[in-house]
Amino acid sequence: MLQPYIPLLLVIALVIANAILMLAVSHIFSTYRRTPGKIAPYESGMPVLGQARERFSVKFYLVAMLFIVFDIETVFMLPWAAAFQQLKEIRGLLLVEMFVFVVILAVGYVYVWKRGALEWN
């Protein structure tokens, strides 16, 4: 009964054993010394300028929102196109659905455009 699952269980056991072995070997052969260089915050090899709890500009959040809007657009439109091709009996409903989605996207695009997120000074 479990015969077909033996290869899968063997692979899972080997992966777990490999992970434990790598952690154990790195722990055994590593040297841990707290030096000022190791405990300092790392930021691209540059010395830290300012505080870590600095406030970000609103423009940063607008660009992030714009990325999310267009990322969701891509994720939604590809399966929609496949469904539109296959479901011929409800194509009208699918067209209305996509029209509503594109209108919502356009509202989001106009919002970030009016807020100046697309201007790079």
Image (spheres, rainbow, N blue to C red):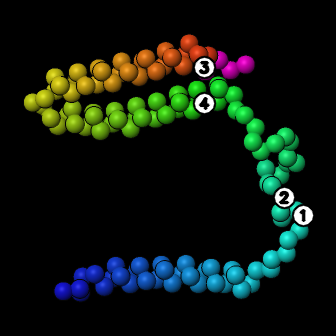
Q: Amino acid at mark 3?
A: Leu
- Under circle 4, the secondary element is helix
Q: Amino acid at mark 4?
A: Tyr
Comparing 79 with 64, the one in front is 64
Comparing 76 with 62, the one in front is 62
- Under circle 2, the secondary element is loop
Q: Quadrant of residue 3?
A: bottom left
> How many numbered marks appear?
4
- Position of residue 66 in the picture relative to residue 78 (left or right): right
Q: Nearer the viewer, mark 2 or mark 3?
A: 2
Q: Which mark is residue 118?
A: 3
Earlier residue among tags 4 and 1: 1
Give the labeled residue for mark 2.
Answer: 40
Give the labeled residue for mark 1.
Answer: 36
Q: Which residues are magenta?
A: 117-121
Give the labeled residue for mark 4.
Answer: 61
Query: How many angstroms separate mark 3 from mark 1 (CA)?
Result: 42 Å
Earlier residue among tags 2 and 3: 2
In the image, is residue 114 above or below residue 14? Answer: above
Residue that protrudes farthest toward the right in the picture? 36
Earlier residue among tags 4 and 3: 4
Please tell me whether residue 119 belongs to the stretch shown in magenta: yes
- Under circle 3, the secondary element is loop
